[in-house]
């Protein structure tokens, strides 16, 4: 049911997580003996990052269609949140290792694809709070019957 706010938040989170595949995460320029070398890093070059972001996208999309089973939808949303956080952590550790191995870094830049998962985390949290609000409303209506 795409009319619910939670479904829209989850769809936006899935779209933002999938935007990671469209761009470059970060670029590093190293200068060795006056030779400038540019290395670009994307998600597809690192298998654990790819697996976590694909899992986050799939879990977000699956959670949209579980609108009749709100407790399961909440669990799927939390799993999508954990997968996105795990992706962000792995990506951060990967950048840290690359910077530690390259001591001749002259310039670096982060692409738009590196920040979109952080916004996806916010959208997944908004969806989770909305699902929880719906579940509380349904439980309170069941008490009135």
Image (cartoon, helix red, strand yellow):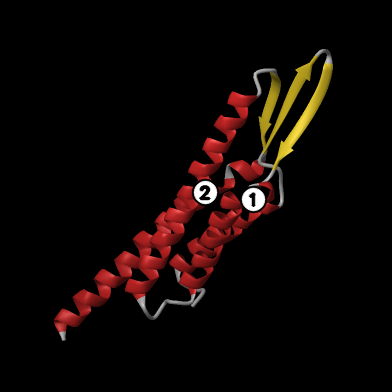
Q: Indicate the position of residue 143 as horizontal and vertical percent values.
A: 15, 80
Residues at circles 1 and 2 in contact by the CB criterion of under 8 Å: yes
Q: Eyeballing the image, is 40 above or below 77?
A: above
Image coordinates for residue 29, horizontal then vertical, percent = 74, 25
Q: Quadrant of residue 25?
A: top right
Looking at the picture, tell me which residue is in the foreground, 33 or 76.
33
Toward the top, the furthest residue is 33
The numbered mark at residue 87 is 2
Residue closest to the far bottom: 145
Residue lying at 35% horizontally and 60% vertically, measured from the top left: 129
Q: Which residue is mark 1?
A: 20
Q: Residues within 10 Å of mark 2 (few under 14, many from 20)?
A: many
Q: Please state, as top left, top right, bottom left or bottom right, where the C terminus lies in the image.
A: bottom left
- On the picture, is 41 further left or further right than 2? right
Q: Residue at x 26, y 72 (%)?
A: 137
Disc 1 element: helix
Q: Residue at x 64, y 45 (%)?
A: 113
- Residue 74 lies, with reference to residue 145, above or below; the image says above
Q: Is residue 72 left or right of residue 60?
A: left
Give above or below for 22 relative to 143. above
**Could you say which quadrant of the image residue 27 lies in?**
top right
Q: Earlier in the sequence, mark 1 or mark 2?
A: 1
Picture coordinates of residue 19, whole percent (x, y): 65, 53
What whole-number distance in Å separates the C-alpha atoms at marks 1 and 2? 11 Å
Q: Residue furthest right?
A: 35
Number of residues whose C-alpha sits closer than 10 Å to that of mark 1, classed few (under 14), some (14–19) or many (20 or more): many
Residue 92 spot, x, y in % from top left: 53, 37
Say which of marks 1 and 2 sits in front.
2
Seen in the image, is 27 located left or right of residue 94?
Answer: right
Describe the element under mark 2 as helix, strand or loop: helix
**Residue 36 located left or right of residue 75:** right
């Amino acid at each position: 049911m795409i009319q619910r706010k939670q479904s829209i938040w989850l769809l936006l989170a899935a779209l933002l997580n999938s935007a990671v595949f469209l761009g470059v995460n970060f670029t590093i320029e190293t200068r060795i003996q006056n030779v400038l070398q540019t290395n670009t890093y994307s998600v597809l070059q690192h298998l654990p990052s790819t697996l976590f972001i694909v899992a986050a996208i799939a879990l977000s999309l699956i959670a949209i269609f579980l609108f009749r089973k709100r407790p399961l939808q909440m669990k799927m949303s939390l799993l999508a949140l954990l997968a996105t956080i795990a992706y962000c952590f792995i990506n951060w550790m990967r950048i840290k290792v690359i910077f530690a191995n390259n001591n001749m870094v002259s310039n670096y830049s982060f692409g738009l694809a590196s920040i979109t998962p952080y916004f996806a985390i916010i959208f997944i949290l908004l969806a989770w709070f909305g699902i929880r609000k719906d579940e509380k409303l349904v439980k309170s209506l069941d008490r009135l019957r």
